[in-house]
Amino acid sequence: MRRIAAIDTFCVPPRWIFVRVRTEDGMEGWGEAIVPKRVRAIAGAIADMAENLRGDDPDRIEDIAQRLRRGGFFRGGPILASAAAAIETALWDIKGRRYGLAVHEFLGGRVRERIKAYAWIGGDRPDDVVAHARERIAQGFSTVKMNATPALPQLGGHAIIEAAAARMGALRDAFGDTIEIAVDLHGRVHRTALKPLLAELAAFRPMWVEEATLPENEESLAVLTRAAGPIPVATGERLIARWDFKRLLDSGAIDIIQPDISITGLFELEKIARLAEIYDVAVAPHCPNGPISLAASLQIGFCAPNVAVQEQSLGLHYHQGFSGLPKADLLDYLTDPQPLTTIDGAFLPPRGPGLGIALNTARIIEAATEWHLPDADWRHEDGVYAEW
Ligand SMILES: [Mg+2]
């Protein structure tokens, strides 16, 4: 029978939450949730949702997504959103496999032949950043992203700002304009530091400045627009749905939005991308996540023309044994790494049905473990809580 039979959650290293939906007629599909410091809350939300979906038609994806988001009277928040996103993504995977089509074929079909990917570089000293960028260039990437600064106090952070500028300068000295460099502020930078920091960075032509204000500080967007000057402004990785993104788009302050498919869900990401098209705003899907999230995100990148670049997590610092968890990397749970392997820093169109990847289920089951991540609190020098 074409009915949902079971929904299982697998928490696997390095910090990923994989969700499998199975049907009574033997189909299965996969999705991926995030919000890693709330692992048991996510797994619990998925278990609650699974109770309510057993026996339902897996083809009625939009109807199920509406129920998951609007059912239960109270709604919203990243935990429920991510749990729903993982289940909904798995239903798309099942639908694609059932009808023998890649998911993007249901959503308008292919609009491009490749999509550029970017890679993370890290390290606090300029030498580290240059060395890491050199490794990424050797892997074929020409677009990288880095955190601009560690925690930055409200006042008097000039030494930190100078160090951030030195890192960007070292990259430009080493590579000129042969690479694009995005800079992530991670919501760490207060309004007081924004103007001096961005004034310093502008000279090095960042591809964008990301999360220069926290999502709840909408009143700061006008300040950000003035501070960013010529630097394109990007944000949105913590937002959930079109309603959030419309406010951001209407503000006129944002040039690039960064929805995360493991929060928005697959079809909602597609709708958000189409909405942004009206504003001539680019989409750079957020994805420091695992392979299922990336494969799902690529399905939208290949059918929405304003998806300009795709984040991916190969070799990300969190994968090297985060908070005492075992190591694992982007391609480890695939039976065939090819669909998520970049060629000259770009992904090629997914060819397989559904999400276009084949997972090593035995390895996932073997790796699945009970785990949670402690809150790694950051604090300023005076003891005040700081954004991570
Ligand atoms: Mg970010």
Image (tube, rainbow, N blue to C red):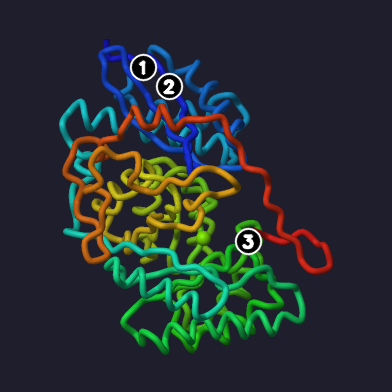
Front-lying residue, 258 or 221? 258
For this view, does 51 lie left or right of residue 310? right
Instruction: Indicate the quadrant containing the C terminus: top left, top right, bottom left or bottom right.
Output: bottom right
Element carrying mark 2 = strand
Residue at x 60%, y 58% (from the top left corner): 215
Kindly identify which residue carries mark 1.
4
For this view, does 293 lie left or right of residue 79? left
Task: Give the distance between the C-alpha atoms of the residues marked 3 and 1, in whole angstroms.
Answer: 39 Å
Q: Eyeballing the image, is 295 above or below 167?
A: above
Determine the image quadrant of residue 77. top right
Kind of residue at badge 2: Ile
Q: Eyeballing the image, is 175 above or below 248?
A: below
Instruction: Decide: few, some or many residues near mark 3? Use Cα within 10 Å; few <14, some 14-19, many ≥20.
Output: some
Front-lying residue, 252 or 127? 127
For this view, does 139 lie left or right of residue 188? left
Residue at x 51%, y 32% (from the top left corner): 69
Kindly identify which residue carries mark 3.
214
Q: Are marks 1 and 2 in contact (CB under 8 Å)?
A: yes
Q: Position of residue 104 (x, y in %)?
A: 23, 44
Task: Give the distance between the C-alpha atoms of the residues marked 3 and 2, in whole angstroms.
Answer: 34 Å
Q: Is mark 3 within 8 Å of ligand 1?
A: no
Instruction: Indicate the quadrant containing the N terminus: top left, top right, bottom left or bottom right.
Output: top left
Q: Eyeballing the image, is 10 above or below 196?
A: above
Kind of residue at badge 1: Ile
Q: Earlier in the sequence, mark 3 or mark 2?
A: 2
Front-lying residue, 66 or 382? 382
- Tell me the number on the disc at residue 7: 2
Q: Position of residue 86 (x, y in %)?
A: 43, 35
Element carrying mark 1 = strand
Residue at x 28%, y 47% (from the top left corner): 299
Element carrying mark 3 = loop
